Image (tube, grey):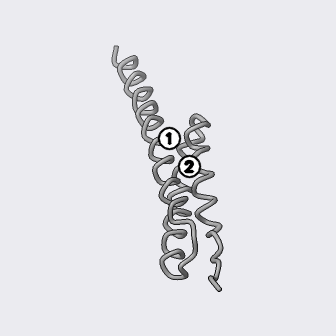
Amino acid sequence: MVEKTQTNSNSVISITLGILSILIPMIGIILGVIWFVFARIALKEIRNTNDNGRGLATAGLICSVVGVVPQLFRVLGFALFFCFILIL
């Protein structure tokens, strides 16, 4: 009989936060940082216990990067804009 392994709960949290970091502006940066912690923990636990969920953790990493990088550029753009306003 084949033994079923459970899906790692941290990988589910990782994918959820990854999707939320894309959908929620400005709060997504904070969610992206929290996502990184959960994804690293999930990948370490999956490697040690052979749980399912490696794909979910990887997808969470990708979604969070897609959500965080544009938001960081937006924040940088606002900062540069206000710096140029103050100089002029």
Task: State the SS at label 1.
Answer: helix
Q: x, y percentage for residue 2? A: 62, 82
Choose between 67 and 74: the one closer to the eye. 67
Q: In the picture, residue 8 is in which quadrant? A: bottom right
Classify residue 74 as left or right of residue 5. left
Q: Compared with residue 20, is residue 5 higher up or lower down, i.e. above or below?
A: below
Q: x, y percentage for residue 63? A: 50, 46
C-alpha gap between disc 2 and disc 1: 7 Å
Classify residue 63 as left or right of residue 27. left
Task: State the SS at label 2.
Answer: helix
Q: Compared with residue 1, is residue 14 higher up or lower down, i.e. above or below?
A: above
Please give the name of the residue rendered at 50% of the width and 58% of the height, measured from the top-left corner. Answer: 36
- Is label 2 in contact with label 1 (beta carbons under 8 Å)? yes
Residue at far top of view: 88
Report the disc number at residue 19: none
Q: x, y percentage for residue 15? A: 58, 54
Kindly identify which residue carries mark 2.
18
User: Which corner quadrant holds the N terminus?
Assistant: bottom right
Q: Compared with residue 5, is residue 1 higher up or lower down, i.e. above or below?
A: below
**Of label 2 and label 1, which has the lower sequence position?**
2
Q: Amino acid at mark 1?
A: Gly
Kindly identify which residue carries mark 1.
67
Q: Residues within 10 Å of mark 2 (few under 14, many from 20)?
A: many
Q: Amino acid at mark 2?
A: Gly
Q: x, y percentage for residue 38? A: 56, 63
Choose between 20 and 28: the one closer to the eye. 20
